[in-house]
Image (cartoon, rainbow, N blue to C red):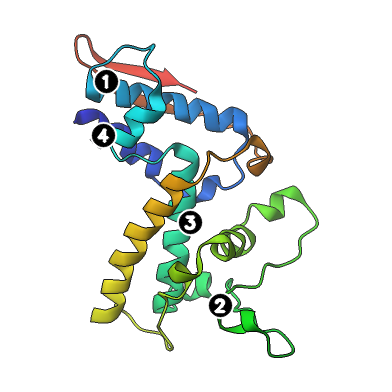
Amino acid sequence: MQACAIVSSRLDYCNSVLNGLSSHNLQRLQTVQNRAARIVLGVGRRVTAEPLLRQLHWLPVGKRIQYKTALVTFKTLSLQQPSYLYSLLTPYNPSRTLRSSHFNFLTVPRVSTALQSRSFSVAAPHLWNSLPLQLRLLVTCTQPCSSLSPQSSINLLSFKRQLKTHLFDLPAPLPSEFPFSRRLCCVLVLPNMFNGAVNYKC
């Protein structure tokens, strides 16, 4: 399981900043994850990767980015901390009473550039509002706190489980969902069972 420890940790590290990654760069990272899945399960390169990822309970890279962003948003709303992130999330309060007033929506700021649309203040509310209602209603905190209450801890575990199930059931993100990015350059190291480590440059 070295591939899981080495590759997954690098794919997950700060991946919430990869919101809006272009399909070209996203596919490069996905190729690395597909290769890791084949190594773990000991199958050839011609085997389709999607069922292998499901067998390992690995979300594809695009959905891992969504998972991390949604999880950071949930924790920020639950703790109302850290303040620098919480200040970027504004609850949706319509001017008149609507049914959606109690759906835990967030206000999505208006932006004028593609780069601005990738920021946490825009991408997080947009993703949060797309989640099922039962996930958004798991946020129960009403005041800032330094740690999760017992009920909030239970809600966090439930949120993680339901979010992963929800993302697994969604179709793969379309290229248009990741239209904006600068070129991504990275080097990931995959363990090779026979010849030591192999560098995959993307």
Spatial CA span between label 4 and label 2: 37 Å
Q: Are the residues flagged by discs 2 and 1 in contact, CB closer than 8 Å?
A: no
Mark 1 lies on a secondary structure that is helix
Q: Who comes first in sequence, dot 4 or dot 3?
A: 4
Q: Mark 1 points at which residue?
A: 39
Q: Name the residue under label 2.
A: 103
Q: Nearer the viewer, residue 11 or 38?
A: 38
Q: Quadrant of the N terminus?
A: top left
Which SS class for mark 3?
Answer: helix
Q: Is residue 109 visible?
A: yes
Q: How far apart are marks 3 and 1 (CA)?
A: 28 Å
Residue bearing the label numbered 3: 69
Report the disc number at residue 7. Answer: none
14 relative position to 130: left or right: left
- Whole-percent x, y for residue 165 in the image: 38, 52
Residue at the spot of label 4: 4
